């Protein structure tokens, strides 16, 4: 998850530090501490967040899905 997310952010001239919010869907809240540990490594300053437990995710076998919103200055993207 982290490598793919970094790649997507970099492609738009951003980094995890630019994240302003996350929405996380997990299939088992008892594993929330594991997610928290990875989140703390990925985001230098954790953004605001919402975490929701769901019965299943789109990808079979997936246990977590994270949606992040990043604020990127227009000059960073060349647009």
Image (cartoon, rainbow, N blue to C red):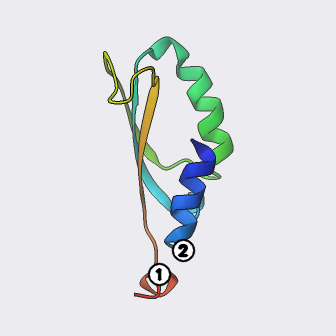
Residue 10 location (% of width, % of height): 57, 67
Marks 2 and 1, how far apart in space? 5 Å
- Above or below — where is 25 with respect to 10? above
In the displayed structure, 41 sits above or below 8; it is: above
Q: Residue at the location (31% across, 20% down)?
A: 54
Mark 1 lies on residue: 77
| Residues packed near mark 1 inside 10 Å, few (<14), some (14 to 19) or many (20 plus) | few
Residue positioned most to the right: 41
What secondary structure is found at the residue carrying circle 1?
Answer: helix
Q: Tag 2, which secondary structure?
A: loop
Name the outermost residue toward the front.
60
User: Looking at the picture, does residue 11 appear above or below residue 57?
Assistant: below
Q: Is residue 52 left or right of residue 14?
A: left
Q: Are marks 2 and 1 in contact (CB under 8 Å)?
A: yes
Residue under numbered circle 2: 13
Give residue 77's position: percent from left, percent from top.
47, 81
Given residues 42 and 79, the one toward you in this image is: 79
Determine which quarter of the picture holds residue 60.
top left
67 sits left or right of 75 in the view: left
Question: Can you give x and y, in whole percent of width and height, for residue 20 in the image?
Answer: 44, 57
């Amino acid at each position: 998850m982290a490598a793919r997310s970094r790649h997507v952010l970099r492609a738009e001239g951003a980094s995890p530090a630019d994240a302003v919010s996350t929405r996380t869907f997990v299939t088992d809240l008892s594993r929330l501490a594991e997610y928290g540990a990875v989140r703390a490594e990925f985001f230098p300053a954790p953004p605001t967040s919402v975490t929701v437990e769901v019965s299943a995710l789109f990808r079979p076998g997936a246990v977590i899905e994270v949606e992040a919103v990043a604020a990127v200055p227009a000059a960073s993207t060349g647009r």
